[in-house]
Image (cartoon, rainbow, N blue to C red):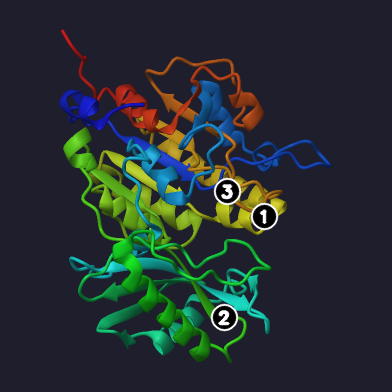
Amino acid sequence: MVNLELIKPISRSSPSRIVLLVIDGLGGLPNPQTDKTELETANTPNLDNLANRGTCGLIDPVGPGITPGSAPGHLALFGYDPVSFNIGRGVLEAVGVDFDLQQGDIAARGNFCTVDESGLVTDRRAGRISTDKCAELCQLIDGLVIDKVKFFVCPVKEHRLIVVFRGEGLTSELSDSDPEQVGLAPKVVTALHPEAGRMAGITNRFLAKVKTTLAGYYPANMVLLRGFSQRPQFPTMVEVCKLKPAAIASYPMYRGLAKLVGMEVLETGTSIEDEFVTLKQNYANYDFFFLHIKGTDSAGEDGDFDRKVRIIEDVDRAIADLITIEPDVIVVTGDHSTPALLKGHSWHPVPILLYSKWCRPDKVTEFSESACVSGGLGRFPATQIMPLAMANALKLNKFGA
């Protein structure tokens, strides 16, 4: 695994430009009827063209057999060891919506969910309610004060929200309330450290109040919390890699993560086309672009194989414009696999392609899981992507004498 301290002294600034296109949840599993994954099913002439001209392989975001969350998956893509730089989802969401986190604040990521008369979760995402509805419901539970701790509740997107705790003596050493599957009751939040007992009690009292307040607001009649965290201090990509990095992402969590590693987050629309237009409009102003596509992951989590195929095809069409501006390095991959057959993240390695003037092309002629198995990059940790991209952009000096 590459150490940031190894990269820092040999990195250098240069006019070359890198585009890292992250198709969230890209990897899949074969449809039993066709024996093809979503990526293999999709018509992707532009991705196949890049694969044919570049070099391919498979990456493990955290490690073989480990199913990654979105945060560790992306941190690895940016070159950060996802174990050493682990961070809770709450802070990422809060930073992503520009919430002013203060020292000592604890942030948690929340989902509005549906519970039945027995208190069991029947839908962890409350039917993916609209963002406007989410904002309306957040107002009902915002501003509560329990034992001198104030709760700030803010909408994120669709069913997602953040809850920020502000007060004295708070800690993030708490278990999640989200059971992460339907048919179970929300979990009681417990202290993971003796000092967190008071915090756990306050959180459970807050959730009890939320349950009462939202009782008549089916399908969003409860909240699940996870990812309790405080804002960390990360070495930035500017410091380590000498880059001027920009992020193009419509979902707040990914915008927050980009900010934490020192990227400038660009304003963009919500469609795939909007994001690629934003890239072209800002191409001259930065030398590293992280462009994030969310829809593939959402489709996979919904178990919608065909929708995931269509979104991959939409991305492929947009890539045609990317190719015309001729970035020095193009990397296309995902932060993890989200097979529609599993309806969630999985441990399966993720296909990757790298194209540059200086890459050593292999014999792969299409971008797919089965083709990338025999690619020249082999199978490697996702943390090694950034050094490879920088090397192909001639942004790394020689190591040692």
The one nearer the camera, 306 or 99, is 99
Against 182, residue 276 (above or below) is above
Q: Which numbered marker is on residue 345?
A: 3
Cα–Cα span, label 2 and label 3: 24 Å
Q: Earlier in the sequence, mark 3 or mark 1?
A: 1
Q: Residue at x 25, y 31 (%)?
A: 4
Q: Residue furthest top?
A: 401
Specify the quadrant that holds the C terminus. top left
Which percent across, then down, holds residue 366?
62, 27
Cα–Cα span, label 3 and label 1: 16 Å
- Mark 2 or 1, which is nearer the eye? 2
Which percent across, then down, holds residue 353?
50, 29
Q: Amino acid at mark 3?
A: His
Q: Earlier in the sequence, mark 2 or mark 1?
A: 2
Could you say whether the residue bearing mark 2 is in a helix, strand or loop?
A: loop
Q: Which numbered marker is on residue 254?
A: none
**Side of 384 relative to 378 (left or right):** left
Q: Which numbered marker is on residue 220?
A: 2
Q: Earlier in the sequence, mark 2 or mark 3?
A: 2
Asked if marks 2 and 1 touch (Cβ < 8 Å), the reply is: no
Q: Residue at x 69, y 56 (%)?
A: 304
The one nearer the camera, 283 or 330, is 330
Q: Amino acid at mark 2?
A: Ala
Which percent across, then down, holds residue 320?
51, 40
Cα–Cα span, label 2 and label 1: 25 Å
**Side of 181 relative to 294 (left or right):** right
Could you say whether the residue bearing mark 1 is in a helix, strand or loop?
A: helix
Could you say whether the residue bearing mark 3 is in a helix, strand or loop?
A: loop
Q: Residue furthest right?
A: 33
Q: Please give the residue where the numbered disc 1 appears in the rendered image.
A: 307
